[in-house]
Structures are given as structure tokens and as C-alpha cells.
Image: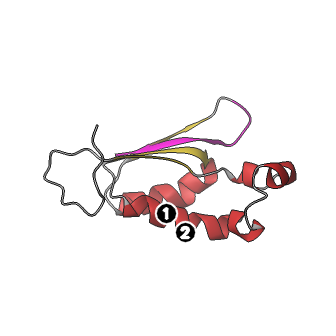
Amino acid sequence: WSRVDVAQRDDGNNLRVLTYNILADLYAGRQLDQQLMYSHCDMKDLMRSRRMPMIIAEILSYKADIICLQEVDASIHDSLISPVLRTKGYQGFYSNKVTSQQEGCSMFW
């Protein structure tokens, strides 16, 4: 492995992989988690309407060949992440957790 500066020109021999936990809404919205895990965050920054545009911009900024996302809400995948990444030429797949939780992982290439 070698670390490649995002600004560095791609000579075709590099594979850029991005993995990112985007924090599912069901965890961001739980009061106990907000008090214990995210007490250092401004609550407005945990709101989907604030978080998602920043997350999408961050993901796109890396120009990754492979994108792996964890804690993806099924509705966010279908309505936001997949449509945006498809317009950038990515194909993808979503897999929900094998629980009643409506979150899982997305992979794009």
C-alpha cells in the first residue's frame, strides 16, 4: 500500500478505495447516543439535512475507484447516495443488515 495525495495525477496504476461510516439516522437521532457518543457535536450537525450534503461532497472529493459505505439507511441509499453516484458513473449495490434495522452497507465501483 502507498498513500496517494488526492491532488496527485492518476497514472492508471493506482486503485483508490474509500471506506466511510456515514452514521445511520437511527443512531444519530437516539437521545442516549446523542448524550453519550456525540455530546461533542452540535445537534444541528447530526441532522440528516446538514450531514448528507457534506458527506456526499466528501465522498466525491476523493474520486475513489471503489467506495464502501457503512451505516447507510436504506432510504438514503435509494433516494440520495445511489442516484448521485450513478450520475458520476458509478454502479453500486446495497445490502441491508440481517436485523430489523433499516441500515446496511453500500458498495460502488
- Which residue is labeled 1 in the image? 56
Q: Position of residue 58 (x, y in %)?
A: 46, 62
Q: Amino acid at mark 2?
A: Pro
Residue occupying image coordinates x 82% and y 49%:
36
Apparent side of residue 66 relative to residue 58 in the rendered image (left or right): left
- Which residue is labeled 2 in the image? 53
- Position of the N terminus, as image quadrant, is top left
**Mark 1 residue element:** helix
**Mark 2 residue element:** helix
Q: Position of residue 46 (x, y in %)?
A: 70, 63
Residue occupying image coordinates x 80% and y 55%:
34
Residue 18: assigned label: none
- Residue 41 found in image quarter: bottom right
Vertical side of 60 occupied by 11: above or below: above
Q: Position of residue 40 (x, y in %)?
A: 74, 60
Residue occupying image coordinates x 79% and y 58%:
39
The alpha-carbon separation of the residues under discs 2 and 1 comes to 5 Å
* Residue 5 lies in the magenta-colored region: no
- Residue contact between numbered discs 2 and 1, judged by CB atoms under 8 Å: yes
Residue occupying image coordinates x 68% and y 43%:
102
Instruction: Look at the image and give the residue range highlighted in magenta.
Output: 99-109
Q: Amino acid at mark 1?
A: Ile
Vertical side of 9 occupied by 44: above or below: below
Q: How many other residues sit within 10 Å of disc 1, few (<14), some (14-19) or many (≥20)?
A: some
Vertical side of 69 occupied by 56: above or below: below
Vertical side of 53 occupied by 19: above or below: above
Q: Nearer the viewer, residue 50 or 91?
A: 50
Q: Nearer the viewer, residue 34 or 91?
A: 34
* Residue 104 lies in the magenta-colored region: yes
Apparent side of residue 31 relative to residue 78 in the rendered image (left or right): right
Apparent side of residue 95 relative to residue 45 in the rendered image (left or right): left
Apparent side of residue 14 relative to residue 66 in the rendered image (left or right): left
